[in-house]
Image: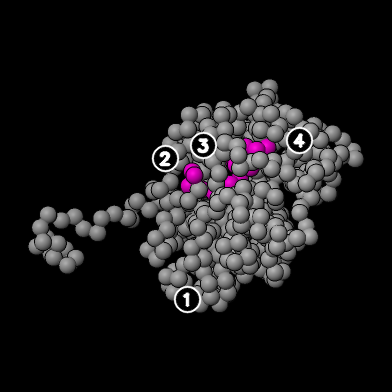
Amino acid sequence: MAVQAVESSTGSADSAGSAGSAGSSVSLGPAVALSCRECGERFPLGPIFACAECFGPLEVAYDLPTGDPEGLRKRIEAGPNNIWRYAPLLPVPADVADKPNINPGFTKLVKADNLARELGVTGELHIKDDSGNPTHSFKDRVVAQAVEAARAFGFTTLSCSSTGNLAGAVGAAAARAGLRSCTFIPHDLEQGKVVMAAIYGGDLVAIEGTYDDVNRFCSELIGDPAGEGWGFVNVNLRPYYAEGSKTLAYEICEQLGWRLPDQLVIPIASGSQLTKIDKGLKELIALGLVEDKPYKIFGAQAEGCSPVSTAFKAGHDVVRPQKPNTIAKSLAIGNPADGPYVLDIARRTGGAVEDVNDEQVVDAIKLLARTEGIFAETAGGVTLGVAKKLLENGVLDPTLTTVVLNTGDGLKTLDAVAPTTGPTAVIRPSLDAFREAGLG
């Protein structure tokens, strides 16, 4: 498929951000332009993230392969068992599968019958378990996309602001791709995430403050000569990076036998994952890969950082920033960039945005581990905790096909459950002691 270069009618791509190489020389598969989500203005493909006209966020626009859904379906199914099976629908070069990459994706969709019985769900209940990715979180998907954009635009350093998982994913992907990495995190993250982000040999910088402070610092660095040649995956590469979350929608539908779920419960940090899953579902419908039918999207937040949930419940369109205070640090973004779009999607699909407290998060982590053998990190506890709350409140329909996302591995957030989790008993090495403990 030929890639079209689309020029802005009012300005150059460089007007909205610093670029390596950009424009018509860049070939990223079916991607043809960057389009403003607010005013619709288009710009050439490049490392920019904000509209030069209205400062709205940019996203990738495509010329997707229409007209032969069965042929496209077969092409996808014949592809590799990772996100590159969906290369015809992503902003990546045609030979992406042949390049050094961490190759995430095609993680398990677990039919959670034990959990369903516990929750009183009579329809299908599935856990999309993204802890099986290379660095054990869904962030590997979005970073893999960003790496391909970084290569296309000639960047030599990969960077990000992160609540932990993203820094680890960037470190691993940069090492694999032969790029330098320099990532930035809040100073008080869980030790497991700090170690995992540092182990890949790149520079890891802890900033005194919250994630929002880290993000502001990175926004300053991107405009400074010190950041020349740097690709910030969630800033100047964000339009491409965010598209990686669409692959969750693609996989879920393919793993369900090419059908849409009725309900999805998705965690909210920046909100980008939720919005891109919705975009992916709409693309599958438009391409004829799944039957068009209604679906509902529900967003999940921790009570200690719930700006989107608060706005949804109040009927507001504006998301007011909050100062995070929750054990779910990977979701602790007090000023979520995609918050307003999450509200739009929840309302459009008939879903909702809800939150749970830290105790409910821990209870949900233990519930999922006890019923399905899946040890979720705190973000997964938030998502399942919200799903449980929505079921109890009659908001989620227990008779429908429901997918709940677990986006990371509980080994990264041991501190959340360690105080209440340990040996059932400590005994002498004898049968009498075993029986005395009530175990035999």
Measured in 3D between alpha carbons, the distance from the residue under mark 1 to the one under mark 2, in whole angstroms, is 36 Å
The numbered mark, 3 or 2, whose residue comes first in the sequence reads 3
The numbered mark, 3 or 4, whose residue comes first in the sequence reads 4
Q: Characterize the local packing of mark 3: few (<14), some (14-19) or many (20 or more) Cα atoms within 10 angstroms.
A: many
Residue bearing the label numbered 2? 191
The nearer-to-camera label among 3 and 4 is 4
Describe the element under mark 1 as helix, strand or loop. loop
Describe the element under mark 2 as helix, strand or loop. helix
Residue bearing the label numbered 3? 172
Describe the element under mark 4 as helix, strand or loop. loop
The nearer-to-camera label among 1 and 3 is 3
Magenta span main SS: helix
Q: Characterize the local packing of mark 1: few (<14), some (14-19) or many (20 or more) Cα atoms within 10 angstroms.
A: few
Looking at the picture, how far across and down is residue 279, in whole percent? 70, 56
Residue bearing the label numbered 4? 26
Amino acid type indicated by mark 4: Val
The numbered mark, 1 or 2, whose residue comes first in the sequence reads 1
Instruction: Decide: is 228 above or below 88.
Output: above
Residue bearing the label numbered 1? 120
Amino acid type indicated by mark 2: Gln
| Horizontal relation, residue 76 to residue 388: left or right | right
Measured in 3D between alpha carbons, the distance from the residue under mark 1 to the one under mark 3, in whole angstroms, is 40 Å
**Part of the protein shown in magenta:** 134-149
Measured in 3D between alpha carbons, the distance from the residue under mark 4 to the one under mark 2, in whole angstroms, is 40 Å
The nearer-to-camera label among 3 and 2 is 3
Q: Quadrant of the C terminus?
A: bottom left
Describe the element under mark 3 as helix, strand or loop. helix
The numbered mark, 1 or 4, whose residue comes first in the sequence reads 4
Q: Residue at x 54, y 62 (%)?
A: 404
Amino acid type indicated by mark 3: Ala
